[in-house]
């Protein structure tokens, strides 16, 4: 009798809960490796707010910043497996996935300024590159900006010759490997989440990143010198698991695309200011000496690093590099 009652009660609970379950929100897990207080971290928060408001709670965005869920390499695997639905990896991290063309963004001094960059990311070249991800089960939604990279180490670095022999952490890009070798340094691929400790313990002598990443990871506390080389670029591709995205109800997808467009404008608007502020914060900390190369020194950096374009032609594609040069030369 008691059993019958329990069974009936259980059936009733299931019955009344069924509509609730059917209305459960679609969850998008968005994992990334940087701090909340960075251009990418803030843009992810913006996207969450816009997407949840536009879909009136039918979509819930769960943010996992600072490698709390996955590190660099793992997060791409997790996306392909469907364990997370959205990421925004740096463009330097797509090589191991088999999409080597993205490493063109790592070529030193390929973009003189953000306007030149946007002619690529917001033009046909950028869109064609996102399409290359489809065969990997990934859909590219947008490019988000960060900024130009600066060198850090415990040694003053005025000219390229000062880099000789330094052990430098790099992202998993063959172009970055070649770039560091051109400087006579020893590159070491390492996940972003491990860099601070590697610097602190002397596993590496230094690295390269925009100030927003250097400051928020506290790298300036374990690096005595920073040189404003602006020798390369770091930006992101916002990507989703293609199967998941294609299966979303059409109205939801449209709302999410609109939210992404607005979050992208926001990301690209705040990136420069965030990096300027971070550089100022590093300066104010008094822990790192900031050096701005003279014009003559800057010419030396270019002279040593621009030949990397030729050396990497075969990997990235001669025609692709030529078309980028053509697009960036346009006014
Ligand atoms: C890195 O150095 O790995 C960074 O580019 C991480 C990031 O996402 O900005």
Image (cartoon, rainbow, N blue to C red):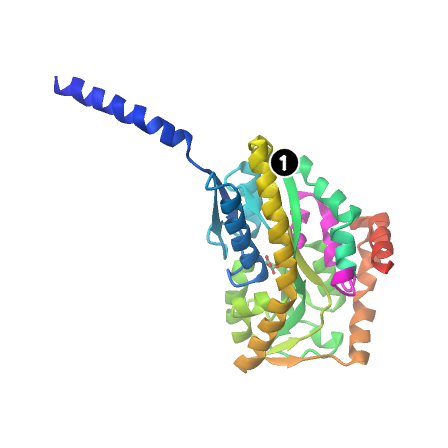
The image shows residue 79 at horizontal and vertical percentages of 56, 41
Residues 278 and 231: in front is: 278
Q: Is residue 215 magenta?
A: no
Q: Quadrant of the N terminus?
A: top left
Q: What residue does disc 1 label?
A: 137
The image shows residue 121 at horizontal and vertical percentages of 74, 52
Q: Is mark 1 within 8 Å of ligand 1?
A: no
Crowding around mark 1 (Cα neighbors within 10 Å: few <14, some 14 to 19, many 20+) is some
Residue numbers of the magenta segment: 91-115
Residue under the image location 80 percent in, 79 percent down: 295
Residues 301 and 166: in front is: 301
The image shows residue 198 at horizontal and vertical percentages of 53, 66
The image shows residue 52 at horizontal and vertical percentages of 49, 45
Q: Quadrant of the C terminus?
A: bottom right
Residue 65 seen in the figure: yes
Residue 171 seen in the figure: no
Q: Dividing the picture into quarters, in which one does residue 169 lie?
A: bottom right
**Image quarter for ligand 1:** bottom right
Magenta segment main secondary structure: helix
């Amino acid at each position: 009798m008691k059993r019958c009652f329990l069974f009936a009660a259980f059936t009733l609970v299931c019955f009344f809960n069924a509509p609730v379950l059917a209305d459960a929100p679609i969850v998008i897990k968005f994992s990334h490796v940087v701090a909340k207080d960075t251009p990418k971290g803030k843009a992810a928060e913006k996207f969450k707010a816009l997407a949840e408001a536009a879909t009136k709670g039918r979509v819930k965005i769960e943010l996992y910043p600072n490698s709390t869920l996955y590190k660099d390499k793992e997060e791409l695997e997790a996306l392909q497996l469907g364990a997370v639905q959205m990421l925004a990896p740096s463009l330097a991290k797509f090589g191991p996935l088999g999409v080597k063309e993205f490493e063109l963004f790592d070529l030193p001094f390929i973009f003189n300024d953000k306007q030149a960059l946007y002619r690529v990311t917001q033009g046909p070249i950028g869109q064609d590159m996102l399409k290359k991800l489809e065969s990997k089960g990934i859909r590219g939604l947008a490019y988000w900006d960060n900024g130009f990279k600066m060198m850090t180490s415990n040694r003053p670095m005025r000219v390229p010759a000062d880099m000789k022999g330094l052990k430098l952490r790099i992202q998993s890009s063959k172009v970055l490997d070649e770039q560091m070798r051109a400087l006579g340094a020893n590159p070491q691929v390492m996940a972003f989440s491990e860099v601070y400790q590697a610097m602190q313990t002397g596993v590496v002598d230094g690295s390269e990143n925009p100030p927003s990443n250097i400051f928020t990871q506290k790298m300036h506390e374990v690096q005595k010198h920073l040189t404003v080389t602006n020798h390369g670029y770091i930006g992101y591709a916002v990507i989703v698991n293609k199967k998941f995205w294609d299966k979303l109800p059409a109205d939801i997808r449209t709302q999410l695309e609109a939210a992404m467009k607005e979050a992208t404008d926001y990301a690209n608007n705040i990136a420069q200011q965030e990096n300027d502020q971070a550089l100022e914060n590093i300066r104010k900390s008094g822990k790192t000496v900031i050096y701005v190369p003279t014009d003559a020194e800057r010419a030396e950096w270019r002279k040593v690093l621009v030949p990397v374009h030729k050396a990497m032609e075969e990997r990235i594609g001669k025609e692709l590099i030529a078309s980028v040069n053509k697009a960036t030369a346009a006014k």
